Image: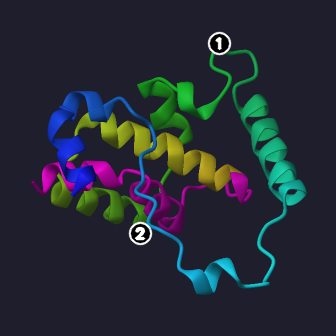
């Protein structure tokens, strides 16, 4: 209810300018008391450093330094989608009524997720995760 009230005050164009937005539900007690280890800080740090190195190499000799700052021509060049990912993006655009700005943000995020797992091409699972980082778009357009 609180999120819905907040969203009603935010315009679509403003929401479009936020790269990542997700709802974080309360964590169930069972998960809080679980002793299973997840990704350690050291492992995550190593992944991020590697992804940043990939970006550094990708943009060598350009003014752009990171995926989040890619301009549309760079997005078209560096955000290659496989066939499944392309169909997924098309479906998300149509179902969620996303703007061109949201489309580009999803591709930038997808490129970063692909970099984190050392993938040249953006796969459907990378894109799916990127789309899920735009949950407020979905909520905004369904009101």
Mark toward the viewer: 2 or 1: 1
In front: 86, or 8?
Answer: 8
Q: Is residue 135 above or below residue 109?
A: below
Q: Secondary structure at mark 1?
A: loop
Query: In this rendering, would 8 be left or right of 130?
Result: left
Question: From where the camera sits, is residue 82 visible?
Answer: no
Residue 7 place in picture, x, y as percent: 22, 43
The quadrant in which residue 39 appears is bottom right
Q: Residue at x 82, y 37 (%)?
A: 53
The quadrant of the rendering that contains the N terminus is bottom left
Bounds of the magenta span? Answer: 116-143
Q: Residues within 10 Å of mark 1 (few under 14, many from 20)?
A: few
Q: Is residue 31 above or below residue 17?
A: below
Number of callouts: 2
Q: Is residue 4 magenta?
A: no
Residue 72 place in picture, x, y as percent: 42, 27
The quadrant in which residue 33 appears is bottom right
Q: Is residue 118 magenta?
A: yes
Residue 134 place in picture, x, y as percent: 37, 50
Q: Secondary structure at mark 2?
A: helix
The quadrant of the rendering that contains the C terminus is bottom left
Query: In this rendering, would 9 be left or right of 72?
Result: left
Residue beneath disc 2: 84
Q: Residue at x 30, y 34 (%)?
A: 16
Residue beneath disc 1: 63
Q: Residue at x 76, y 22 (%)?
A: 60
Sequence-first disc among 2 and 1: 1
Main secondary-structure element of the magenta-colored stretch: helix
- The label shown at residue 48 is none
Q: CA distance from mark 2 to mark 1?
A: 31 Å
Q: Residue at x 33, y 42 (%)?
A: 103
Residue 105 place in picture, x, y as percent: 42, 38
């Amino acid at each position: 209810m609180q999120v819905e009230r907040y969203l009603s005050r935010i315009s679509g164009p403003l929401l479009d300018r936020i790269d990542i937005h997700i709802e974080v539900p309360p964590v169930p007690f069972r998960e809080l008391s679980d002793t299973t280890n997840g990704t350690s800080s050291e492992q995550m740090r190593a992944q991020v450093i590697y992804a940043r190195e990939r970006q550094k190499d990708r943009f060598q000799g350009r003014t752009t330094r990171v995926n989040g700052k890619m301009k549309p021509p760079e997005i078209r060049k560096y955000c290659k989608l496989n066939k499944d990912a392309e169909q997924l993006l098309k479906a998300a655009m149509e179902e969620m009524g996303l703007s061109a700005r949201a489309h580009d943000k999803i591709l930038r995020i997808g490129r970063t997720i692909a970099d984190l797992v050392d993938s040249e091409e953006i796969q459907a699972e990378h894109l799916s995760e990127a789309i899920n980082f735009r949950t407020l778009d979905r909520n905004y357009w369904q009101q």
